[in-house]
Amino acid sequence: MKRKILLFASISGATAIIFGAMGAHLLEHKVEIGQLLPKDLHAFETAAKYQLFHSIALLCIVLLMDKLPEKLMRITGILFMFGIVLFSGSIYLLSTQALLGIGNLMWLGPITPLGGLCFIAGWLTLFMAALKAKNIN
């Protein structure tokens, strides 16, 4: 499982940087010329930040797996991965659907908070793992 989380974290980190740069350069220009709303750019940038933060957190999860209860750390990693896909992924699509020429994606709206709940549950699972740890002072 460590390898899977590490592979996911590395790809997720790279795409977060790509999407962050895309937001700062390409999408900012789209706002300037009126093809994208400022609120959509802000949402896109938020998605990239959360993706990057949780990609880094996944790297930490891999490093902590030998020190904290492995089962809880696996669950934390899985929750963070689902959070990235559901939260950031849905925001990326929702905020750029007009630019991409994709039809109505409003059905994705309820998916975003599910991703946020995955992030919260992941952090709480990490807290439980830290409470149960016997070999950390």
Image: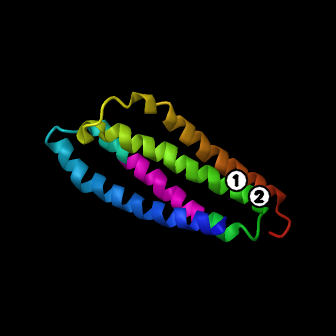
Q: Residues within 10 Å of mark 2 (few under 14, many from 20)?
A: few
Identify residue type, mark 1: Ile
Label 1 with label 2: CB-CB less than 8 Å: yes
Residue drawn 54% across the image and 56% down it: 54
**Hey, which quadrant is residue 73 in on the image?**
bottom right
Front-most of residues 53 and 77: 77
Front-most of residues 97 and 103: 103
**Label 1 belongs to which residue?**
75
Q: Position of residue 18 (x, y in %)?
A: 34, 60
Q: Secondary structure at mark 2?
A: helix
Q: Position of residue 12 (x, y in %)?
A: 47, 60
Q: Main secondary structure of the magenta part?
A: helix
Front-most of residues 42 and 119: 119
Q: Secondary structure at mark 1?
A: helix
Residue drawn 38% across the image and 61% down it: 17
Whole-angstrom CA distance, mark 1 to mark 2, is 6 Å
Residue drawn 86% across the image and 65% down it: 134
Identify residue type, mark 2: Lys
Q: Position of residue 9 (x, y in %)?
A: 53, 63
**Hey, which quadrant is residue 3 in on the image?**
bottom right
Question: Which span of residues is magenta-colored?
Answer: 45-59
Kindly tell me whether residue 43 is visible in this rendering: no
Q: Is residue 54 magenta?
A: yes
Tell me the colour scheme of the image. Answer: rainbow
Q: Residues within 10 Å of mark 1 (few under 14, many from 20)?
A: some
Q: Is residue 40 magenta?
A: no
Establish if 18 lies above or below 92: below
**Label 2 belongs to which residue?**
71
Q: Residue furthest left?
A: 33
Q: Quadrant of the C terminus?
A: bottom right
Q: Quadrant of the N terminus?
A: bottom right
Left or right: 115 as drawn, with respect to 105: right
